Amino acid sequence: MKLTIPTEEDIQYLNAELAEMSAKERLAWAAKTFTPGIAVSTSLQTQSVPLLHLVSEVCPEMPVIFIDTGFHFPETLAFRDAINECCHLNIQVIHPTITKEQLERDYGKDLYRRDPDLCCYINKVEPMQRATEQYQVLVVGVRHDQTNHRSALRVIERRFTGPVRVHPIIDWSQEDVQNYIEEHNLPIHPLSSQGYPSVGCAPCTQPVSADQNGERAGRWVGKEKDECGLQVEFSGQ
Ligand code: SF4
């Protein structure tokens, strides 16, 4: 069945309704309204855990898309297994179309240093576009307090391309995430306790020192970049 995609007028009306709901109620509404045309995207970090736990309670069959870029820390892949053990999710692992070896052969060594936007496009954005072609709606665990771009997002957003986005925990704080994890005794990413508040690909993630502010301060350090392209409209290669 082909879903009717909400118009911008619908989106404004829905956001007024959704703003009054809890994260669980938002997710339940989205699952009821859009299944089977809906999936969840996750980067499998500590801050991903509350949304994944809510999915396990509300809609455990919903596909959970994880892009395995080939550059993840081994701890992230172990964390995927730990989350799955506690939450029993329908995780679908998606890979880039080329291997790390082909990437180096075609684009040269360490593309992530020379052109991280292109590296992210090949290894994250294109695989996500491919994985979500069949869905009309994508649930994402972004929050207002993470980046400037995210601070302006609403609970439900249309995009120029790709699925409509639903952000059930958009108005949560980092403290809300921590409280939820403690309250439900959920696992945390093994690198969180080693100074990594946000964990992406290993070459582009550093531990954060005491004088650095922001959950994502350790991502793409020294570069004018704070998003991989999955959360912003990608304007080309
Ligand atoms: S985060 Fe770094 S290694 Fe990962 S895809 Fe982007 S540029 Fe490449």
Image (cartoon, rainbow, N blue to C red):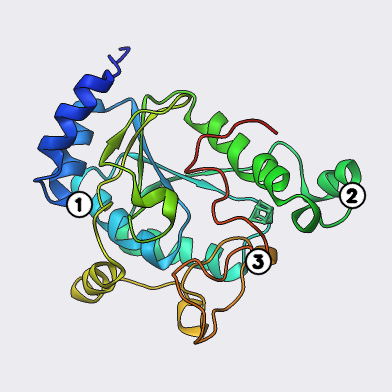
Q: Which mark is residue 57?
A: 1
Instruction: Give the amino acid type for the residue marked by disc 2 in the picture.
Output: Gly
Q: Residue at x 38, y 59 (%)?
A: 48
Q: Is 121 displayed left or right of 142 in the figure?
A: right
**The N terminus appears in which quarter of the rendering?**
top left
In the displayed structure, 72 sits above or below 229; it is below
Residue matched to label 3: 202
Q: Residue at x 56, y 29 (%)?
A: 130
User: Residue 10: percent from the left, percent from the top?
Assistant: 20, 22
CA gap, disc 2 to disc 1? 45 Å
Element under label 2? loop
Mark 2 or mark 1, whichever is nearer to me: 2
Residue matched to label 2: 108
For the residue pair 136 and 82, the one nearer the viewer reads as 136
In the displayed structure, 45 sits above or below 101; it is below
| Circle 3 crowding by C-alpha within 10 Å: few under 14, some 14–19, many from 20 | some
Element under label 3? helix
Which of the marked residues, 2 or 3, is nearer the chain's N terminus?
A: 2
User: Residue 208: percent from the left, percent from the top?
Assistant: 54, 79
Instruction: Give the amino acid type for the residue marked by disc 1 in the picture.
Output: Glu
| Circle 2 crowding by C-alpha within 10 Å: few under 14, some 14–19, many from 20 | few
Disc 3 beta carbon < 8 A from ligand 1?
yes
Q: Is 35 displayed left or right of 64 in the figure?
A: left
Element under label 1? helix
Instruction: Give the amino acid type for the residue marked by disc 3 in the picture.
Output: Ala
